[in-house]
Image (cartoon, rainbow, N blue to C red):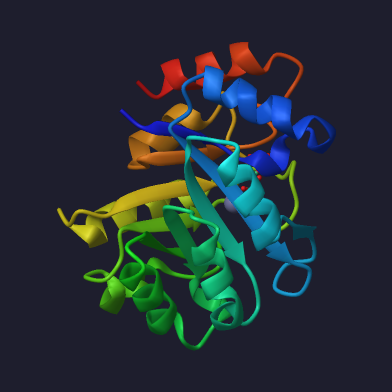
Amino acid sequence: MAKILPSIFGADILRLKDEIHFLEEEQTEILHVDLMDGTYVSNIAFGPNQIAAMKKASSMIFDVHMMLANPERHIDDVINTGAEMISVHYESTPHVHYIIQKIKKAGRKAGVVLNPGTPESVIEYLLDDIDYILLMTINPGQPGQTFIHKSLEKIRNTKKMISGRDIQIEVDGGVNLDNVKQVKEAGADLIVVGGALFNKQPHESYQALKIAVQ
Ligand code: DX5
Ligand code: ZN
């Protein structure tokens, strides 16, 4: 069974407290939180202070997806938000191993993120140090994009590469009710959903997504 991780970036910012409350009511275990700096990706979203405030108002596990240039400059602040899971883009730093060590030393789960154009083989030498791999199935930064179909092959190849290690595969971008089953069957354990959950019927959408990945 795979888990659906709502992406708070897709929520209504003017009703943020209600949206968090809704997710708690829906028994959400893990909340995906995007951190974007306007440099590594074009968008800007949720800085460490906002994430810490949301964390205080919630009992969910926080999965912070760092989309930052120079993550080494911000990692301490991100750790201080209290997030239990923190991921760093492989492409965003020459010091990816250093960031992973910092996350692990703080007692959190460490993830490495790969953009659609980055082959999974680049993280072979990190496999003994990480808890999860986040595969982007859109180019990060903007909501409402179309799932890149070729990613299904990459999920399958990543699953083969980790060969039995205790590493989870997370998928992020363009997932909806039409493709979520294929994403799960390809090998994803954690599936991030933004726009396809925070719509006019969030309860019904969330339930349908959960049922599809059972
Ligand atoms: C995009 C973010 C995603 C985003 C996904 O860069 O990393 O987490 O919220 O949104 P959807 O599911 O709408 O593509
Ligand atoms: Zn994300």
Q: How many marks?
A: 0
Image coordinates of residue 37 in percent, x first then y, are 73, 68
Quadrant of residue 44 within the rendered picture: bottom right
Q: Quadrant of the C terminus?
A: top left
Outermost residue toward the bottom in this view: 94
Q: Residue at x 38, y 81 (%)?
A: 97
Image coordinates of residue 211 in percent, x first then y, are 43, 15
Outermost residue toward the front in this view: 56
Q: Residue at x 72, y 45 (%)?
A: 145
Report whether 62 appears left or right of 52: left
Image coordinates of residue 30 in percent, x first then y, are 46, 38
Report whether 69 appears left or right of 113: right
Q: Quadrant of the N terminus?
A: top left
Q: Nearer the viewer, residue 46 or 202?
A: 46
Task: Judge whether 175 appears above or below 48 on screen.
Answer: above
Q: Nearer the viewer, residue 211 or 159?
A: 211
Outermost residue toward the right in this view: 14
Residue 102 shows in this picture: yes
Report whether 180 appears left or right of 144: left
Task: Judge whether 9 appears above or below 103 on screen.
Answer: above
Residue 196 shows in this picture: no
Quadrant of residue 42 within the rendered picture: bottom right
Q: Residue at x 40, y 83 (%)?
A: 98
Quadrant of residue 9 within the rendered picture: top right
Q: Residue at x 65, y 48 (%)?
A: 53
